[in-house]
Image (cartoon, helix red, strand yellow):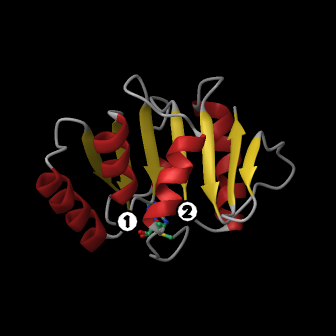
Amino acid sequence: MGAAYDPAPMDKVYKMLIMAEVGREDVVFDLGCGDGRVLIAAARRFGSRAIGIEIDPFRFLFAWFMTIISGQTHRVRIRFGNFFNKSIGEATAVMLFLYGPTNNRLKEKFKRELKPGTRIVSYIWEFDDWQMVDCLPEDKIYMYVI
Ligand SMILES: C[S@@+](CC[C@H](N)C(=O)[O-])C[C@H]1O[C@@H](n2cnc3c(N)ncnc32)[C@H](O)[C@@H]1O
């Protein structure tokens, strides 16, 4: 596991997506997508395609259910499993609300799989030794670019 379930407040979710300037041309990944709120917001508010990966079977099913009720099944996909073992190369923006050690363990995967220019936005946790390109310190939202 890379973090326990704890949904990000919706105002933080919107600030993360706005910081990454996501739009219709983007593929937004949420690693550990919980109830799918980040994906649904990215699809509904910004018109992005959005892909979530979730390891907890209950959260996975709930996120899928929330996607159906939101009417965003044409834009949102939820994948069941461990994000360390799933391909993320399609992403143009990655949203994270995990733990600091998990962020740092993901660095090698990000460098290997993500395209140059992909934005990574993390709520609460920073990356050790990576140069931040934008931040909202009072919201604890930090952005990095591959
Ligand atoms: C702090 S919650 C964040 C949920 C959502 N991203 C949000 O911002 O509301 C972290 C989520 O990551 C999931 N998770 C933790 N480790 C994971 C892993 N290795 N692969 C996939 N999901 C994982 C947990 O089950 C939990 O739902």
Q: Position of residue 17 (x, y in %)?
A: 50, 45
**Mark 2: amino acid:** Phe
Q: Decide which of 34, 56 is in the foreground and name it.
A: 34
In the rendered image of this protein, does residue 48 appear above or below residue 42? above
Does the closest atom of ligand 1 sit within 8 Å of the Cβ of label 2? yes
Q: In the rendered structure, are the residues bearing label 2 and label 1 in contact, judged by CB atoms less than 8 Å apart?
A: yes
Residue 115 falls in image quadrant: top right
**Disc 2 element:** loop
Q: 10 Å neighbourhood of mark 1: few (<14), some, or many (≥20)?
A: many
Q: Is residue 117 above or below residue 54?
A: above
Q: Residue at x 19, y 44 (%)?
A: 72
Residue that label 2 marks = 97
| Residue for point 64% across, 51% down | 106
Q: Which residue is mark 1?
A: 34
Which residue shows up at 71% across the image and 41% down it?
144
Along the horizontal axis of the image, is 7 left or right of 69? right
Q: Residue at x 44, y 43 (%)?
A: 29
Q: Circle 1 — which element?
A: loop
The image shows residue 16 at horizontal and vertical percentages of: 55, 50
Amino acid type at image mark 1 = Gly
Relative to 44, 17 lies left or right: right
Residue 91 visible in the shown view: yes
